[in-house]
Image (tube, rainbow, N blue to C red):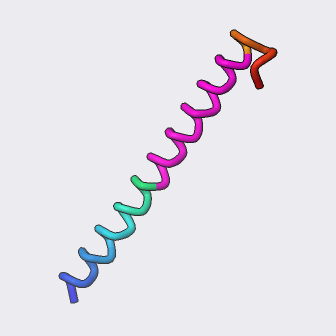
Amino acid sequence: MSSLGSYVQMIFYRFSTLFEYEAVIHETRLTYMGLLHAISPSDC
């Protein structure tokens, strides 16, 4: 029973880190696109 609990906890930990990673990637992409747009506004 304890092994199952630790397994579920590990899965939740994996998902939390995955979502965190996705958020960081999304923010980085938005910042990168924002910088590109600021540098060259004509190039959408």
User: How far across and how far down the image is residue 15, in percent?
Assistant: 42, 63
| Left or right, 23 with reference to 38 | left
Magenta stretch bounds: 19-37
Query: Which quadrant of the view contains residue 12?
Result: bottom left
Q: How many marks?
A: 0
Identify the residue shown where x is 79% and y is 15%. 41
Residue in front for this viewpoint, 25 or 14? 25
Q: Is residue 31 magenta?
A: yes
Identify the residue shown where x is 54% and y is 45%. 23
| Left or right, 9 with reference to 24 | left
Residue in front for this viewpoint, 41 or 25? 41
Query: Which quadrant of the view contains residue 9?
Result: bottom left
| Left or right, 8 with reference to 21 | left
Q: Is residue 22 magenta?
A: yes
Residue in front for this viewpoint, 27 or 41? 41
Q: Quadrant of the C terminus?
A: top right
Residue at the extreme left of the image, as rendered = 3
Q: Main secondary structure of the magenta part?
A: helix
Q: Quadrant of the N terminus?
A: bottom left
Q: Vertical placement of 4 versus 43: above or below?
A: below
User: How far across and how far down the image is residue 30, in percent?
Assistant: 64, 32
Query: Which quadrant of the view contains residue 14?
Result: bottom left
Q: Vertical placement of 1 versus 5: above or below?
A: below
Identify the residue shown where x is 75% and y is 20%. 43
User: How far across and how far down the image is residue 35, in percent?
Assistant: 65, 17
User: How far across and how far down the image is residue 33, in percent?
Assistant: 65, 27
Residue at the extreme right of the image, as rendered = 42
